[in-house]
Amino acid sequence: MASVAISARYAIPKGPTGHNGSSVKMYRPDSDDPNSLSNIVEPLSNRELDVLDLLAQRLSNKEIAEKLFLSTTTVKGHLQNIYGKLNVKKRREAVEKARVLGMLTPHKR
């Protein structure tokens, strides 16, 4: 990996990109906590993070698809990837683990 720029939530690689040409957001925690993101085998893609943020807002697959201009099948695929990367089986588990890991964007109410 080339040099890394640090943002508030993620280290964004300057160099290799995701499979679709977009840069991949990665989080590098300094913690030895078993719930830290260092235990996640593969980082979530930008799109998976977008889906996860909307999932945390309790949107349905259809609503997520409409907001992101995707098909519901694509949303389901992203959800399966998220579940696998976070090692969870349900929507609520994914949101809870993402909250614990600090992966969710704070939303104004």
Image (tube, rainbow, N blue to C red):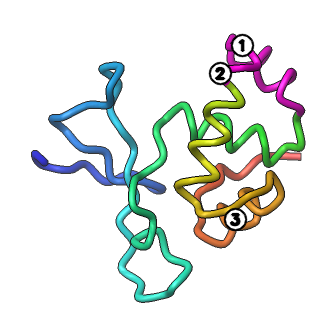
Q: CA distance from mark 3 to mark 2?
A: 23 Å
In terms of secondary structure, where does tag 1 sit?
A: loop
**Residue positioned 89% across, 43% down in the render:** 58
Image x and y of residue 93, in percent:
77, 63
Front position in the image: 88 or 107: 88
Q: CA distance from mark 2 to mark 1?
A: 5 Å
Which numbered disc flags the more N-terminal residue, 3 or 2?
2
Query: Is the residue marked by circle 3 packed among few (<14), some (14-19), or many (20+) residues within 10 Å?
Result: some
When the figure is inspected, residue 1 is found, relative to residue 61, above or below; the finding is below
In terms of secondary structure, where does tag 2 sit?
A: helix
Q: Which residue is mark 3?
A: 99
Q: Which residue is mark 2?
A: 74
**Residue positioned 65% across, 49% down in the render:** 105
Q: Is residue 93 magenta?
A: no
When the figure is inspected, residue 21 is found, relative to residue 34, above or below; the finding is above
Q: Nearer the viewer, mark 3 or mark 2?
A: 2
Which stretch is magenta? 60-74
Q: Is residue 13 left or right of residue 108?
A: left
Front position in the image: 20 or 80: 80
Indicate the amino acid at tag 1: Ser
When the figure is inspected, residue 66 is found, relative to residue 83, above or below; the finding is above
Indicate the amino acid at tag 2: Thr
- Residue 71 shows which numbered tag? 1
User: Could you tell me how many numbered marks the image carries?
Assistant: 3
State yes or no: discs 2 and 1 in contact (Cβ < 8 Å): yes
Image x and y of residue 67, in percent:
76, 18
**Residue positioned 71% across, 31% down in the render:** 76
**Residue positioned 39% across, 61% down in the render:** 41
State yes or no: discs 3 and 1 in contact (Cβ < 8 Å): no
Q: CA distance from mark 3 to mark 1?
A: 26 Å
